[in-house]
Image (spheres, rainbow, N blue to C red):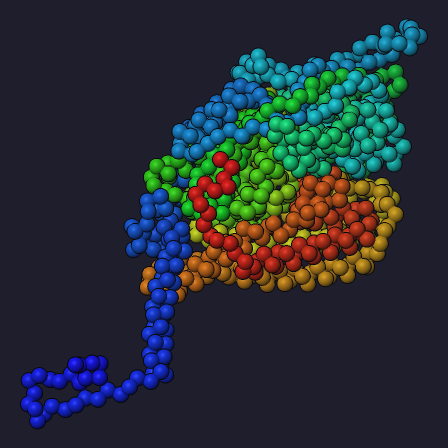
Amino acid sequence: MASESTPLLAGNAPQSQRRVLVRRPRSGAGIFTRWVLIGCGSLVFVGGLALTILAFLLLWPVGANHRSVLDIIKSGFRDEFVSKVSHAELQNILLDTPSADKSREWSQYYTAGPHLAGKNLSQAVWTRDRWSEWGVDSRIDAYDVYINYPDGLGLAMLSKNTTTSDASAAGWKIAYKASLKEDIIPADESTSSPDRIPVFHGYSASGNVTGQFVYVNYGTYRDYDDLVKAGIDLKGKIALARYGGIFRGLKVKRAQDLGMIGVVLFTDPGDDGEITKENGYQEYPDGPARNPSSVQRGSTQFLSVRPGDPTTPGYPSKPGSPREPVDGAIPSIPSLPISFKDALPILKALNGHGPAASDFNRAWNRNLGLSYLGVNYNIGPSPADLVLNLYNNQKYVTTPLWNVIGVINGTLKDEVVVLGNHRDAWIVGGGVDPNSGSAVLNEVVRSMGVALDAGWKPLRTIVFASWDGEEYGLIGSTEWVEEYLPWLSGANVAYINVDSGVGGPHFRAAAAPLLHSVLRNVTASVLSPNQTVAGQTVGDLWDGRISTMGSGSDFTAFQDYAGIASLDMGFKPDEHSAAYHYHSNYDSFYWMDSFGDPGFQYHKTMAQITGLVMAHLVNLPVIPFNATQYADQLVVYIDSVEAKLAATATSATLSDDVDNTLLTAAEVHSATLLGLTADQMHFNQRSRAATATARTGSPSAFKKELAHLRRTLAKFRTAAVELDADRAFVERELAAHVPWWRVWRLARMVATLVRTNYRYKVLERAFLYEGGLDGREWFKHVVFAPGLWTGYAGAVFPGLVESIDASDYSNAVKWTKIIDGCFKSAIAAATTTDVPDYEFEIGRSLPI
């Protein structure tokens, strides 16, 4: 019987030709070798197939939105991951859709009724409904916050009744009573609204105080210090301060620290630039000059200490949240805002009493806009028989406020860009602040809704936010960031803020350095409404200055607390623009339509800029950040610190300098490095202690540590250059139309893309220090923070700057080591290979 060893014979062959074929027995080694070869070949085949599939899966969220890479396989993807709109087509939609007429319509709606924080639910619902109509999933997030509303105000100048010796109140008579009202203008309907809001300060203390009064200039730290050095007794007095330069709450804080009992704030028209009645311009509504009865309301919270609900520092104000004491966060003395018309009799009453502004340094003699009306700007104090009575009754409540949150889900769930504007205002109107930004935000949402209808799907998730409670202390945005901090830390790529989107014709911006390039690229591509030279862009007319991030708007919690690269931008007035009635009833739709932006073309342009910035951030495969520019800016910031240190060494004690408003060459150099305007330079210098305290530590030891810091920074720059090189590599590969069969090349590109985006996303977080700044622990960013005594303006390396101001070089050395650690963390972030999975499940961890 045949077996495996039986020869198989060719049946037709002659017997003589048949040969026996003998097969050699298989050796174990041969069998092993053959199976090894078969196995290796199979592994190569399977591995190659797996890599090909993996490359396509990785490219799925990238190529699906970008036709230049994988058009040929695009049709094979499921519909929900496919965008039918190219990036170029998206940009066209975002340029063509925004409408001046629509912007005007949104502005008219928001400014038609009062929308004070905690009292604007109807506008929140309206905003949510409009966004939903435009295809954006939207909801309202509520927080229970601690704020105040006015419940009785009064300001009177009292003179002693010389006809009686009665020391009681009956011995005084009212010499003058301030109206504490803004004039009704028939043409401006919001000024006659029955629901118009009284003049008052957010977070001001209730009180009924009476005392002599003193003119304190702008109420900066150095202004008060000048008065103390001049022997002016401030204790028990009421301060009369002009608005400007620094955050109003810090004017009150310094008065409180010096034992004063109240503060009255007014706006001097001299700060309006050229456009004043003194220079021949008619007053609003007949012309562009300031209306004499305009009053700037606003918050007096100590914004540079911590923003948000003062009773819930570091955690969200949800129902049932524990409440902390407000000590140190808001004033303990009362304050009131008044018009310059109301201030005139009070200022004139000081004529001839005490030294005049002209007896002080030049900081006291700038923009004296009431001199032509008979004000001598004497300091006082007023005589003992002439006092002010300040009555301020505030009702403090815990009340809901409402953020509107809208989401467009992107393909990538771990990369999110947030765009926000606040909706609340101190007044019925708010044509500039905030509702020019509200109109811009609506136009961006509407434009992206048009893109969604056309089949667009963003690569990254978009969150739109209409914040409430910004005016009191950035409450809505701060509470939201505090609530969603873990999610934001893992997913948020950038935050874009549009507050006062349009108040004049001049583009201005403040931004984290990572965002500088994308902003410059966008402004260079958007036509300016000013076409005196045909074809000129916003970038052509912009001076190119990008300020450092400080505070004063809703980017603060993102940038300074969560470490999320942020951008704040808008069109602003200058000294030649119509006077802007900030936080006044005259910041109205009528003012905007007549003087601010007739025709609403700047609103349209602002929507185009904002839309394109968002498009670049959410739709380009590689995040368009620039880390090298960040490193270079950090070098500039350290240069400014060393210039400040040199200025301190050369000026010794500024208190010995009668004209201490003069900046040394080193101080000018420091300010120039930071790109500060002349006004910013002036108020930064006036907002630090003029009298040096006893020196602690060694300046030379501090300089040595700064030198070490520079060496670490040089290493960070090397890592940043390499990170940007990876971005450039991905951009080149995307533009090269790499064919699908170049699997290894595509896989390398995708791996580099995923790694680069993650590194960019977490880079800003590296500059956070968990312990926070000295005395204001809520602020975590070691590079950017509001100036301790400016509030609005940004300070760079605040730990170092404040240590120099205090002559505490031991503390400066401590902060140098902290910053060095952050630089090393930034190096690690820019080079990390520990990159998590690229895609998240749809809807996972989203706050809506």
Camera-nearest residue between 116 and 534: 116
Instruction: Tell me if 252 is positioned left or right of 752 in this view.
Output: right
Q: Quadrant of residue 422?
A: top right
340 to the left or right of 537:
right
In this view, which residue lies farthest toward the right?
Answer: 165
* Residue ID at (66%, 54%): 822
The residue nearer to you, when weighing 601 against 38, is 38
Along the viewing direction, whichever of 366 and 466 lies nearer the viewer: 466
Q: Please name whichever residue, 304 or 183, is drawn nearer the observer in this view of the structure.
A: 304
Residue 22 percent across, percent down from the top left: 21, 89
Question: Which residue: 78% across, 44% down?
Answer: 662
Vertical placement of 225 versus 26: above or below? Answer: above
Q: Looking at the image, which residue is at 84% across and 54% down?
A: 697
The image shows a total of numbered marks equal to 0
Q: Position of residue 450 (x, y in %)?
A: 37, 36
Q: Quadrant of the N terminus?
A: bottom left
Q: Using residue 328 as the reference point, say whether residue 759 is left or right of it.
A: left
Residue 396 picture quarter: top right
Could you tell me if residue 586 is visible in this image?
A: no
Q: Position of residue 612 (x, y in %)?
A: 45, 43
